[in-house]
Amino acid sequence: METTGTRQQPNSKWKTSASMLQRAAQSLTGGVSSPFRAKAPVPLYFKDGVGARLLDVDDNWFIDYTLGWGPNILGYKHPELIDAVRWAAEGVHDYGAQHEMEYLVSEKIQSMVPCAERVAYTSSGSEALQIVMRIARAATGRNLILKFEGHYHGWMDSALISYKPSASDVGAPESPNMVLGSKGQVANSKDNVVVVRWNSAEALEEALQRYPIAAVVMEPVLCNSGCLPPLPGYLEKVRELCDAKGTLLIFDEVITGFRIGLGGAQGFFKVMPDLATFGKALAGGITLSAFAGRKDLMELMLHGGVSFGGTFNGNPIAMAGAYATLNVLERGALWEAAKMGAMLMDGIRDIADRHQIPLLLTGFPTAFSFHFTKRAELKDYRDTFDDDANVLRRFVMAMINEGINVLPDGRIYTSAVHTENDIQETLSAVEKALFQATM
């Protein structure tokens, strides 16, 4: 990913965005609200969007596959989401107390998500992961959390470990190094974490034999590091190994929740965790995350001494957005998003095959990634070290120039409002961008 310090000089196509960035940098750190957004040709400023398309301040239209980094599963200006948020905005914005929409949304989640005996809310996925780890430690009386290389569970000190370590930092496969993800992160963040390679039942079994683990946490599909799927039978084996050791299983479904299926990855793969976190697609772009799980675990926050709170938890505007979004997805919109995504994936593979371009697509129809690699399969984070990062960078830049907005890591999200015309236009752009990136 390019940063503000290495960004290419923008051409006149992005002139207004470049000017706005220069002004913003005088008051907003780096001119962006999240450093992840600092990308070539310039962090684009947008002024409008409708359906699956975005309009930037230089009047360039894009078919958008970033969807706000995942949340906007209904696209932009979906009428039911607008009506719901307008209704809530005309009322009280935050009671700091109970209201009907909280349990209506919770009941809706219970009807969809297998593990959701009880539900609670936060404002961000990072917060949700912190509280489920706290619950796991309280429930088991153990301190250690086991996570996997390449998996992202938020930016806080206790979770940002071995997220995207370099090839020179990872260490031996059988005993991976624990790599801090940020300067300023305290070294003892590693004291309560164990890191192993993903998709290896043997590595997990050895760690569970060696350490008293409170919980195993994972992205059930590794969306943040290349959209890598679990190997057949792997999730089932993880569940079995956790049960044998009295270790809890946590699924980080911030991305997969309400996107891979209405029941999340746990419903799709039919493997139920003890606790799970959700966000992004949950409220269609309104700020909301959630966590859910077994009743006995969740109610430790009431009767078991586990502290949790938040002024904006379950606020009316966010809950109204979630209720509308879940209703739309349940009526078939998620199926439409998957249909369009499958069409796009098939078309891209056909183009790459015809032009003999070494390209691997991984993930599922509503969230997948490009890998310019000669590998036939990617099993874990370390396999992505063989990706050609330079070709990917050129491809992403070419796609933006062709009017297709994708994430800087080559990730694609499809929405319920992408159309067959959008897909065909995108495939035409993909063919041009692949040629430009690999010539």
Image: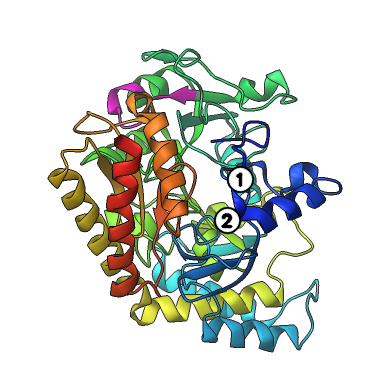
Q: Is mark 1 on a helix, strand or loop?
A: loop
Disc on res. 13 = 2
Question: Can I make out residue 238 in this image?
Answer: no
Instruction: Identify the magenta region.
Output: 195-203
Kindly identify the residue that appears in the image at 28 percent across and 59 percent down.
Answer: 427
Mark 2: which amino acid?
Answer: Lys
Residue lying farthest to the right in this orientation: 27
Residue 137 place in picture, x, y as percent: 60, 37
Seen in the image, is 161 located left or right of residue 351?
right
Q: How is the image coloured?
A: rainbow
Kindly identify the residue that appears in the image at 38 percent across and 24 percent down.
Answer: 385
Instruction: Check whether the beta carbons of the residues at disc 1 and disc 2 lie within 8 A of each other.
Output: yes
Residue 196 is covered by the magenta coloring: yes
Kindly identify the residue that appears in the image at 37 percent across and 15 percent down.
Answer: 173
Disc on res. 10 = 1
* Crowd tier of the residue under label 1, counting other residues whose Cα lies within 10 Å: few below 14, some 14–19, many 20 or above: some
Tell me the quadrant of the picture where the C terminus can be found.
top left
Q: Is mark 2 on a helix, strand or loop?
A: helix
Marks 1 and 2, Cα distance to the nearest angstrom?
A: 8 Å
* Crowd tier of the residue under label 2, counting other residues whose Cα lies within 10 Å: few below 14, some 14–19, many 20 or above: few
Q: Is 269 or 426 nearer to us in this picture?
A: 426
Residue 429 place in picture, x, y as percent: 33, 57
Kindly identify the residue that appears in the image at 13 percent across and 46 percent down.
Answer: 354
Residue 311 is covered by the magenta coloring: no
| Residue 120, quarter of the rendered image | bottom right
Question: Can I make out residue 130 in this image?
Answer: yes
Seen in the image, is 395 located left or right of residue 217?
left
Residue 327 place in picture, x, y as percent: 45, 81
Residue 432 place in picture, x, y as percent: 31, 51
Q: Please tell me whether residue 22 is drawn above or below residue 283 in the rendered image.
A: above
Q: Is 153 or 421 nearer to us in this picture?
A: 421
Mark 1: which amino acid?
Answer: Pro
